[in-house]
Amino acid sequence: MRIVNKTGYTMVQFYGSNVGSDSWEEDILGSDVLPSGSSVIVNFDDASGYCKFDFKAVFDDGDELVRKGVNVCEIGTFTYN
């Protein structure tokens, strides 16, 4: 799945967890960042067949955007505007 950042801010952390999970797990970007206007490919296929994930993006201005119930099996691109 392609994650696109079109917010005007740099994404400094990104999390994707199975819907219903009690934890955000690890920062998928790790030590990397995702500047505005850029994208990254994230593989959510963990062999479980699970399709619905909650996303959390943290930006360099401190804002956090959470999107719940994203079906990664049905869409190929998710854009933060």
Image (tube, rainbow, N blue to C red):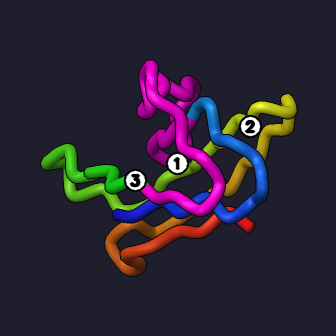
Q: Where is residue 2 in the image (x, y as percent from the top left)?
A: 39, 64
Tag 1: amino acid? Val
Highlighted magenta segment, given as a residue range = 14-39
Camera-side mark, 3 or 1: 3
- The rendered magenta stretch, by its main secondary structure, is classed as loop
Camera-side mark, 2 or 1: 2
* Dot placed on the residue nearer the N-terminal end, 3 or 1: 1
Can you tell which quarter of the image residue 70 is in?
bottom right
Do we see residue 69 in this rendering?
A: no
Residue at 22 percent of width and 52 percent of height: 45
For the residues bearing labels 2 and 3, Cβ distance under 8 angstroms: no
Tag 2: amino acid? Phe
Answer whether residue 26 is magenta in the image: yes
Residue at 74 percent of width and 67 percent of height: 81
Cα distance in 3D space between marks 2 and 1: 22 Å
**Residue indicated by mark 1:** 19
* Dot placed on the residue nearer the N-terminal end, 2 or 3: 3
> Looking at this rendering, what residue extends furthest in the left direction?
47
Q: How crowded is mark 2: few (under 14 residues within 10 Å), some or many (20 or more)?
A: many
* Dot placed on the residue nearer the N-terminal end, 2 or 1: 1
Q: What element carries label 2?
A: strand
Residue at 26 percent of width and 51 percent of height: 43
* Circle on res. 52: none
**Residue indicated by mark 2:** 59
**Residue indicated by mark 3:** 40
Which residue is more in the foreground, 5 or 77? 5
Q: Is residue 50 left or right of residue 72?
A: left
